[in-house]
Image (tube, rainbow, N blue to C red):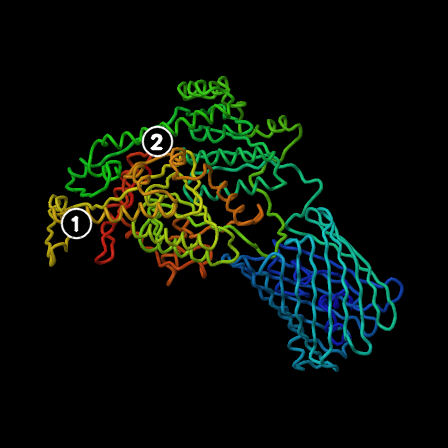
């Protein structure tokens, strides 16, 4: 019964010895760095609990070899778990059998909070432990003691902590015969390799009675499973009766289990040998020599500019994950376009080159989905499925006559016959220059498809063209044509993979979390995304119709923060935008130039980086584009919709009052006057010249050379490279790799993406309803976010359809135009460098 009572109240009897006050551990014979994650942090340093992943349970037993004079003999159990919102909880139970006096026990409860700054990658944490200490001896009182600590993990190779122990005991609030001194200490740790492979730590503490204690600990990882620890502890140093303890041991960590032990030697007027043993459980599996081979299934959903980046980053992580033996891609109505398909194809090829086969399972695949898969190791098709490999098509919906019939007149002023975006609101047929450039873009993109499919299927280009011309294919036709490896039900795929590998694979939809071996993120690559229309002010989103705009101030704020952040080694400017406001585009361009003066900036073009999208990219050190990226469209137009006739048909009266010859310039209730047209023609020439000069400065080209390929012309990424508008062909992953090279960081350097967007209506409503909220904060709301609340109906006019756009999309974009007319600052007219969603 006495032993049971002691286990319930567990820990060390505080007044047992002075050595116990300055020694870091309660059961101190288990050598472990005080800044390392683990359940023993409850006793060592509660702030370190925030470094835990999942939960951990540890048990230790300490005893003497021959004598019973080893201090703090006994048993200890520690438990720690990470919680959401940066919280962590811990608990510990000790039963201590000292060489003198009664057994003692204690219970300890810890709470910690920490946050990794996404601005710097550093983690700062604080924690506290409350211990209930007692003894079955009725002559001794029970007492509650408080520990507290603060830990800082600024970089992967260094960490520090301040630790206070028995803080309330120092105030003499107990009824024990001997006053309990508090102690205050500092710990610093170094990881020379930046990971947990080797940790060297020093801890010094002094108690309120002036006694000094120190500890040094070293922990070395040997191979994948073993860790060796050594530690020295000293108490009452430089005084008579000083004490020393030496410990050496090892533990093995494999899967979810850990076990180990070691020797303890004390010098306190003599030499006293002892030993310890420990065992533990982990929720996060550690390395295992017999880890099963996994075939990981990745669902490819409907992809937009942001979801594509998340998918590519995930595929990059899979490429470097030793637990994954093979990858299975399964598409689910992805709506994949040509440029995005090229990026996925590039990622598939890179994983295959890394030695991991990539298989695709298709139900009813589009041509773009099959194109992305053709670079893999094999493609399987549902027996009732098919492949719609029929080439490329585009539908451009022109609303000019519809708008005129409705009483809406589109009024635009533009430079260059190729700047054709306004035609979608003013005409019913595209102009000859618009048709010519669209055909040239299609020829380039289709030629890329033929060459890539020829390479992937190991056939000639004419044979690849014939395959496309004979499409679409039902399942047996696809098999007979050699487009797929086999026809299989999804649930039979594991048997096919077993035949391929010669052994069974575990097909999983997700992998468990990997153990973390770094204190902090270290140097990273920053990604600033410009997607959707470029508008003045802050990012704007209307999730219900998927309207997203990149605000100049939001993007500039992210660029400035990343440029000033010493942990960001290089910046990738990801552009997936057809342009927008000339003012916002120039603000972003200047911000890119300022960032470029401090660190490398690599521009990565997505499906489209045209007009204002190309404007901002031209300021980077290098520009990367997919071969099918739609870019160029260097030009300017300005316009508005005149809805007065529509309102008249609806019997809505409009009475205009104007003071000033051009007061109604931006009014949507009348068209431009001849004077206003002349004025606007001159203004857009000024903006066009500024556009040209920005490209000249950013790209180092001659102004006449830029003008010769400008005036609104669009180009494929492949053609743009030949013209000098693009430096290299490659997708987002290749741009990230290039940024790592320029920043001289490892391939494991993490990536941080900003600014954030609401992921759906839940995020949007949470931001909209929260008082003083910041709906469009970047990844670090305190450092990168300087945006206001969303204004969903104040984005500028962005109209036109895209490559393969359906009429529904055109109507949605027209609706956006009608909802958002006229959002300008007083006295400053809007200028659009392009308003086309995909094609101008």
Instruction: Give the residue at x 25% y 32%.
Output: 433
Instruction: Give the mark nearest the N terminus, 1 or 2.
Output: 2
Residue 629 in the image: state x and y as whole percent.
39, 36
Give the CA separation, mark 1 to mark 2. 34 Å
Residue 302 in the image: state x and y as whole percent.
42, 38
Q: How many marks?
A: 2
Q: Quadrant of the C terminus?
A: top left
How crowded pointer 1 is (Cα within 10 Å; few <14, some 14-19, many 20+) is rated as few
In the image, taking residue 258 as reference, residue 437 lies left or right, namely left
Kindly give the residue lying farthest to the right in the view shown. Answer: 66
Q: Quadrant of the N terminus?
A: bottom right
Q: Secondary structure at mark 1?
A: helix
Which residue in the protein does label 2 denote?
441
In the image, taking residue 731 as reference, residue 173 lies left or right, namely right
Q: Quick check: marks 1 and 2 in contact, CB under 8 Å?
A: no
Would you say residue 465 is visible in this rendering?
yes
Image mark for residue 201: none
369 shown above or below 585: above
Would you say residue 840 is visible in this rendering?
no
Residue 522 in the image: state x and y as whole percent.
57, 55
Instruction: Give the residue at x 72% y 47%.
Output: 225
Q: Quadrant of residue 662?
A: bottom left
Mark 1, mark 2: which one is toward the viewer?
1
How crowded pointer 2 is (Cα within 10 Å; few <14, some 14-19, many 20+) is rated as many
Q: Secondary structure at mark 2?
A: helix
Which residue occupies the foreground of this view, 580 or 3?
580
Which residue in the protein does label 1 denote?
679
Residue 440 in the image: state x and y as whole percent.
33, 29
């Amino acid at each position: 019964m006495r032993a049971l009572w002691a286990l319930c109240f567990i820990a060390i009897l505080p007044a047992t010895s002075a050595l116990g006050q300055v020694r870091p551990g309660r059961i101190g014979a288990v050598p472990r760095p005080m800044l390392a994650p683990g359940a023993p942090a409850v006793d060592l340093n509660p702030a370190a609990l925030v470094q835990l992943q999942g939960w951990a349970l540890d048990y230790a037993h300490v005893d003497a070899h021959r004598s019973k004079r080893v201090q703090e003999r006994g048993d200890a159990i520690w438990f720690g778990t990470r919680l959401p919102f940066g919280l962590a909880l811990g608990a510990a139970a000790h039963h201590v059998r000292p060489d003198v006096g009664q057994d003692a026990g204690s219970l300890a409860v810890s709470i910690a909070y920490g946050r990794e700054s996404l601005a710097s990658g550093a983690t700062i944490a604080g924690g506290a432990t409350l211990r209930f200490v007692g003894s079955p001896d009725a002559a001794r009182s029970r007492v509650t003691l408080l520990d507290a600590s603060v830990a800082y993990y600024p970089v992967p190779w260094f960490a520090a902590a301040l630790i206070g122990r028995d803080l309330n005991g120092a105030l003499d609030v107990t009824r024990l015969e001997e006053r309990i001194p508090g102690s205050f200490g500092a710990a610093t740790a170094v990881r020379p390799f930046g990971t947990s492979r080797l940790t060297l730590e020093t801890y010094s503490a002094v108690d309120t009675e002036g006694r000094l204690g120190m500890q040094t600990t070293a922990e070395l990882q040997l191979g994948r499973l073993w860790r060796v620890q050594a530690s020295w502890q000293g108490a009452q140093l430089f005084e008579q009766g000083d004490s020393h303890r030496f410990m050496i041991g090892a533990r093995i960590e494999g899967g979810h289990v850990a076990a180990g032990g070691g020797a303890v030697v004390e010098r306190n007027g003599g030499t006293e040998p002892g030993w310890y043993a420990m065992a533990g459980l982990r929720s996060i599996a550690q390395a295992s020599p017999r880890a099963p081979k996994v075939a990981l299934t990745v669902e490819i959903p409907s992809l937009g500019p942001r979801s594509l980046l998340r998918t590519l980053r995930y595929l990059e992580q899979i490429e470097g994950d030793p637990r994954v033996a093979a990858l299975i891609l399964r598409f689910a109505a992805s709506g994949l376009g040509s440029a995005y398909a090229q990026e996925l194809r590039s990622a598939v090829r890179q994983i295959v080159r890394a030695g991991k086969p990539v298989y695709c399972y298709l139900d009813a695949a589009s041509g773009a989905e099959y194109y992305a898969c053709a670079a893999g190791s094999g493609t399987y098709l549902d027996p009732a499925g098919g492949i719609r490999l029929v080439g490329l098509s585009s539908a451009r919906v022109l609303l000019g006559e519809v708008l005129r019939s409705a009483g809406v007149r589109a009024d635009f002023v533009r430079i260059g016959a190729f700047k054709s975006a306004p035609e979608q609101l003013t005409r019913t047929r595209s102009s000859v220059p618009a048709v010519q450039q669209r055909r040239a873009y299609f020829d380039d993109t289709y030629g890329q498809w033929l060459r890539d499919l020829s390479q992937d299927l190991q056939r000639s280009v004419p044979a690849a063209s014939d395959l496309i011309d004979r499409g679409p294919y039902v399942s047996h036709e696809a098999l007979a044509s050699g487009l797929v490896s086999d026809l299989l039900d999804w649930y039979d795929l594991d048997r096919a993979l077993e035949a391929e590998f010669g052994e069974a694979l575990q097909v999983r939809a997700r992998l468990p979390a990997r153990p973390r071996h770094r204190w902090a993120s270290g140097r990273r690559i920053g990604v600033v995304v410009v997607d959707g229309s470029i508008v003045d002010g802050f990012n704007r989103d209307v999730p219900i119709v998927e309207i997203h705009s990149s605000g100049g101030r939001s993007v500039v704020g992210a660029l400035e923060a990343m440029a000033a952040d010493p942990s960001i080694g290089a910046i990738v400017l990801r552009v997936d935008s057809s342009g927008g406001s000339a003012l916002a585009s120039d603000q972003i361009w200047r911000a890119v130039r300022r960032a470029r003066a401090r660190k490398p900036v690599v521009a990565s073009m997505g499906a489209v980086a045209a007009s204002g999208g190309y404007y901002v990219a031209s300021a980077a050190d290098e520009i990367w584009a997919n071969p099918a990226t739609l870019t160029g469209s260097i030009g300017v137009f300005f316009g508005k919709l005149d809805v007065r006739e529509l309102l008249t048909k609806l019997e809505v009266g409009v009475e205009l009052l104007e003071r000033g010859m051009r007061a109604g310039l931006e009014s949507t209730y009348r068209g431009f006057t001849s004077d206003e047209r002349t004025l606007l023609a001159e203004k857009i020439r000024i903006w066009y010249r500024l556009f040209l000069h920005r490209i000249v400065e950013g790209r180092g080209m001659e102004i006449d050379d830029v003008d010769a390929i400008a005036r609104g012309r669009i180009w494929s990424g492949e053609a743009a490279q030949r013209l000098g508008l693009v430096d290299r062909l490659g997708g987002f992953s290749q741009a990230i790799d290039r940024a790592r090279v320029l920043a001289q960081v490892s391939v494991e350097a993490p990536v941080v993406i900003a600014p954030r967007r609401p992921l759906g209506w839940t995020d949007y409503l949470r931001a909209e309803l929260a008082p003083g909220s910041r709906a469009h904060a970047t990844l670090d709301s305190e450092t990168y976010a300087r945006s206001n609340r969303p204004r969903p109906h104040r984005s500028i006019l962005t109209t036109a359809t895209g490559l393969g756009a359906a009429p529904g999309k055109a109507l949605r974009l027209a609706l956006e135009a009608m909802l958002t007319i006229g959002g300008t600052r007083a006295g400053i007219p809007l200028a659009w460098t392009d308003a086309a969603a995909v094609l101008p």
